[in-house]
Each structure stands twice: as structure tokens, then as C-alpha cells.
């Protein structure tokens, strides 16, 4: 899962949410430089990534996309699962609920600017300014996310080919997402109780 998935499965603790959202930027034991409450979210981020990457449905989705010639399929499955989450009435009954959640999440992120590195501030500044999380709901939002990622990291592939493979296989990927998310919610609730 990408940022919307991480936010959605962060529970009700703002510090877990903030640490979870910042987690991609923190390598090795650098998380120890943050307040303990934020560290918990960073550790949770790693656990959630590990759980996601090892889940059989995510592996099946990745295989499907690789069979379409997409080399870094896992990266794009993460983003596409955010598209499914944004449109999943289990989490967001309508666009207004999604927008309220994303604005709240981004506001909490903005409140954590003082603990962010400059690259985090730049990255999350764009996320906040353009509300990327909300725009994962639409095809155009996913297109912008993937095109932007490819511009920053061209080695990941051709955006047009990746987008075609994702949307051409949307109905095949949907049950894989549904199997995964049902189990991920249960895993998340159990894991967060330990925090």
C-alpha cells in the first residue's frame, strides 16, 4: 500500500499516523532520532510494509503485473491499491468522507513539520498542497501519481505502459485487493493493540 493505505490503517493515534507516514524516509536505525511516540509509528510502518509485501494476494497482484512486462510491479501495485482503498465504501462511504479524512491526515502531517527533514518537508508539502491522498480516488489522480513518480525515477519504467497494465487489469486486481485488505485490517487492529 501507498500513503493512503498507510494512513487508513494507522488507527486513532496521531503519533502512530505521523510516524507511519514518515516511515519511507527513515532508513536503518535513524528512527531512534525521533520522539518515542513517533518511533512507534515508524516501526509500525515497517511491519505494515513487510506484512503487505508477504501477503499472498499482493504477491499474486505483483505477478500479474510482471506478466504484463512491468518490472517494478510491487511499487505500482502499492499505488493502485490506494486507488481501491479510496473507492472502498468500507472505509469511505462517499467522496466527502474521503476528503475529510485526507484533509485531517494532511493537517496532522503539517503539524509535524518541525521534526521533518528538508526532503520530507518538500515532499509532504506537495502532498498537502495538492491533496494527493484524496486524488487517489480517480483515474487521473493515479495517472498523475505514477507519471510524477516516473519523472523522479525514470528507471522504474514507462508510465503509459504501467498505467495501461494497471487499468487494463483493474477487474482482475480488485479481488486480490479485497482479499488482502480484509486480512490487513484484522492484522492492523491486532498489531496496533500491542502499541
Image (cartoon, rainbow, N blue to C red):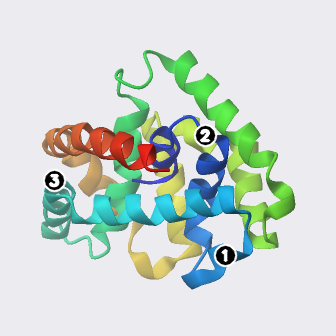
Judged left or right of residue 66, residue 89 is right
Determine the residue located farthest toward the front in the rendered image.
194
Q: Which mark is residue 62?
A: none
Q: CA distance from mark 3 to mark 1?
A: 33 Å
Name the residue carrying label 1. 32
Q: Residue at x 57, y 80 (%)?
A: 27
Q: Residue at x 46, y 33 (%)?
A: 137
Determine the residue located farthest toward the right in the rendered image.
114
Q: CA distance from mark 3 to mark 2?
A: 28 Å
Q: Quadrant of residue 53?
A: bottom left
Q: Residues within 10 Å of mark 3 (few under 14, many from 20)?
A: some
Q: Secondary structure at mark 1?
A: helix
Q: Residue at x 18, y 48 (%)?
A: 169
Query: In terms of depth relative to the viewer, which is nearer, 32 or 132?
Result: 32
Image coords of residue 29 (percent x, y): 59, 82
Q: Secondary structure at mark 2?
A: loop
Determine whether 6 is above or below 158 in the image. above
Determine whether 20 is above or below 10 in the image. below
Name the residue carrying label 2. 13
Q: Are marks 3 and 1 in contact (CB under 8 Å)?
A: no
Nearer-N-terminus badge (3/1):
1
Q: Which mark is residue 57?
A: 3
Q: Quadrant of residue 90?
A: top left
Q: Residue at x 43, y 43 (%)?
A: 193
Q: Are marks 2 and 1 in contact (CB under 8 Å)?
A: no
Q: Nearer the viewer, mark 3 or mark 2?
A: 2
Nearer-N-terminus badge (3/2):
2
Q: Are marks 3 and 2 in contact (CB under 8 Å)?
A: no
Image coords of residue 16 (percent x, y): 59, 49
Image coords of residue 146 (percent x, y): 47, 58
Q: Nearer the viewer, mark 3 or mark 1?
A: 1
Q: Secondary structure at mark 3?
A: helix
Amino acid at each position: 500500500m501507498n500513503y493512503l493505505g498507510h494512513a487508513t490503517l494507522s488507527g486513532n493515534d496521531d503519533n502512530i499516523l505521523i510516524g507511519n507516514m514518515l516511515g519511507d524516509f527513515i532508513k536503518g536505525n535513524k528512527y531512534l532520532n525521533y520522539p518515542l511516540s513517533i518511533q512507534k509509528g515508524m516501526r509500525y510502518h515497517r511491519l505494515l510494509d513487510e506484512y503487505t509485501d508477504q501477503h499472498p494476494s499482493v504477491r499474486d497482484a505483483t505477478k500479474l503485473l510482471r506478466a504484463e512486462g512491468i518490472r517494478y510491479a510491487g511499487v505500482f501495485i502499492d499505488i493502485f491499491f490506494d486507488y481501491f482503498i479510496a473507492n472502498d465504501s468500507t472505509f469511505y462511504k462517499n467522496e466527502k468522507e474521503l476528503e475529510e479524512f485526507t484533509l485531517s491526515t494532511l493537517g496532522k502531517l503539517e503539524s509535524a513539520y518541525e521534526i521533518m527533514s528538508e526532503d520530507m518537508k518538500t515532499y509532504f508539502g506537495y502532498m498537502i498542497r495538492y491533496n494527493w491522498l484524496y486524488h487517489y480516488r480517480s483515474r487521473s489522480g493515479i495517472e498523475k501519481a505514477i507519471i510524477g513518480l516516473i519523472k523522479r525515477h525514470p528507471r522504474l519504467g514507462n508510465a503509459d505502459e504501467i498505467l495501461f497494465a494497471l487499468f487494463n487489469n483493474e477487474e482482475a486486481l480488485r479481488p486480490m485487493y479485497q482479499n488482502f485488505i480484509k486480512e490487513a485490517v484484522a492484522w492492523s487492529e491486532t498489531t496496533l493493540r500491542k502499541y
